[in-house]
């Protein structure tokens, strides 16, 4: 900060917790409502990058992103087969031999 620019920069993060009224008081209810409105305005109006629309939510390992379409299809087929077996594992065969 120089003498020519007396404006202090705004802190991004403060270690001191925000002062809040005692829970159960009207001041607390007003403070909570104000805080909720501020956060809702921020989260519901700002533009957020949701990532690649074709992939959806990223879950799993990084190596899955590097797989080809054929490898992904094979893995999904194997996962479907495993799910079918998992659903059937409590069933018993009634074939008489």
Image: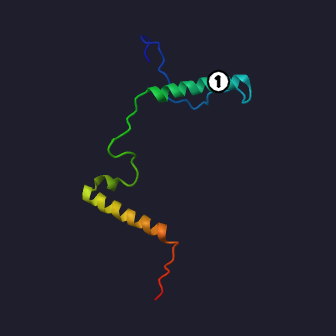
Q: Residue at x 61, y 28 (%)?
A: 18
**Quadrant in the picture for residue 75:** bottom left
Please report the residue visible at 35 percent of the width from the left and 65 percent of the height from the top: 78
Q: Residue lying furthest right in this view?
A: 25
Instruction: Kindly identify which residue carries mark 1.
Output: 31
Which quarter of the figure has residue 50?
top left
In the rendering, at what x and y percent does residue 17 appear?
A: 61, 31
Secondary structure state at the residue bearing disc 1: helix
The quarter holding residue 16 reads top right
In this orientation, which residue lies closer to the viewer: 15 or 74?
Answer: 74
Asked whether 57 or 28 is in front, the reply is 57
* Residue 95 position within the rendered picture, expressed as x and y whole percent measured from the top left: 47, 83
Residue 31 appearing in the image: yes
> Which image quarter holds the N terminus?
top left
Image coords of residue 91 (percent x, y) = 51, 73
Question: Which residue is nearer to you in this view: 5 or 89?
Answer: 89
Q: Is residue 68 visible?
A: no
Going 47% across and 14% down the picture, which residue do you hit? 7
Q: In the rendered view, does 48 fall on the left or right side of 28? A: left
- Work out whether 90 lies above or below 16: below
Label 1: few (<14), some or many (≥20) within 10 Å?
A: some
Q: Is residue 91 above or below residue 4?
A: below
């Amino acid at each position: 900060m120089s003498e020519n620019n007396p404006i202090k920069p705004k802190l991004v993060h403060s270690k001191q917790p925000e002062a809040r009224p005692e829970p159960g008081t009207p001041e607390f209810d007003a403070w909570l409502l104000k805080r909720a409105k501020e956060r809702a305005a921020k989260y519901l109006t700002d533009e957020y990058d949701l990532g690649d629309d074709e992939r959806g939510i990223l879950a799993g390992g990084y190596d899955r992103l590097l797989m080809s379409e054929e490898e992904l299809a094979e893995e999904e087929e194997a996962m479907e087969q495993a799910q079918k077996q998992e659903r059937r594992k409590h069933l018993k065969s009634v074939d008489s031999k």
